[in-house]
Image (cartoon, helix red, strand yellow):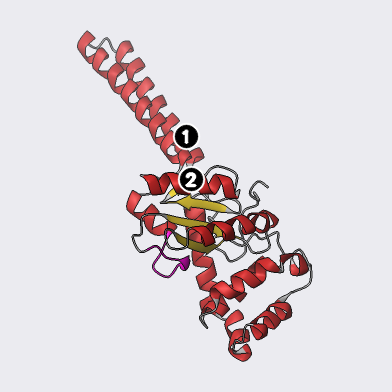
Amino acid sequence: MPPHKTKARRGTGTRSRKAPGSGAEPAARTGGARAKAAGKAVRKARRGGMGTNLKVTLSLVAVAVVALAVAFVVSRAGGEDVPAGEVAQSVVRADSHRLSTAADGKVTVVEFLDFECEACGAAYPGVERLRAEYADRITYVVRYFPIASHPNAFNAAHAAEAAARQGRFEQMYVKLFDNQTAWGHNQQSQVETFVGYARELGLDVDRFRADLASPEVEARVRADAQDGERLGVRGTPTFFVNGDRYEQDPTYEALKKTVDDALAR
């Protein structure tokens, strides 16, 4: 199943809308003004009978201004480049949740997911199979990217993070996906369902409830989503293998081949 393509919103650090007077469109107007001014200077020089050398110089300046204006517009329209070091840090952070850790650290797989996403649920069995087979050879990292159109995606992410505060992230991760069809895409809040999962996992329920609504948990989920937006994540599941975005279908076979190729390097 292809990744869900809806953007994350509502408190998850989506990209801010451009403020008036910023971005590529104003840049285009500025570039056009510069080119127009340069052309005017050339025409004026011609009317004034300036020397050939000066005319040539002004013509070259005009061409240079136009080229710079075009380059500026293209650069702004394409977005700012992110330094490689910052990209690596945005893919995996020190506090990112690791479901497995390889001793040699050679291969790291990162999944940006939404617990309510059906495509994530479809990929989940293959991911678990991959984790079981490569448990000691790959580091597997899970990061939150709740989708706004999924009514309980944020609550589910908060539930996983609240469980993580009691050392039970992986157990809640499994609970949420194993029972996705029971609670997913329900328009009513599923908080009490998640509290029930916490109780089944032996968590301190009062603490779990408090963490579910805490600003710290909200900020933690939002930080993951902000990193996802920064990396160009637009849907779930989205995978990165050793920092490179995985572009194939999220099937066990395709993921396994990519992991094997990375291990062989």
- The spot of residue 183 in percent (x, y) is 75, 69
Q: Nearer the viewer, residue 59 or 239?
A: 239
- Dot 1 falls on a residue whose secondary structure is helix
Q: Look at mark 1 in the image and give the residue it sits on.
A: 28
- Give the residue drawn at x 68%, y 67%: 178
- Is 139 covered by the magenta stretch? no
* 28 lies above or below 149: above
Magenta segment, principal secondary structure? loop
Is residue 158 visible in this depiction of the protein? no
Amino acid bearing label 2: Thr
Q: CA distance from mark 1 to mark 2?
A: 41 Å
| Occupied quadrant, residue 50 | top left
Between 58 and 210, the residue placed more toward the observer is: 210
Check the image and report above or below for 38 versus 180. Answer: above
Q: Position of residue 86 (x, y in %)?
A: 36, 55
Q: Are marks 1 and 2 in contact (CB under 8 Å)?
A: no
Give the image quarter of residue 146.
bottom right
The magenta segment: 92-102
Q: Residue at (43%, 44%) from the top-left corner?
A: 261
The number of numbered discs placed on residues in the rendered structure image is 2
Q: Which quarter shows the C terminus? A: top left
Q: Position of residue 154 (x, y in %)?
A: 64, 68
Q: Is residue 167 at all visible to an observer of this figure?
A: yes
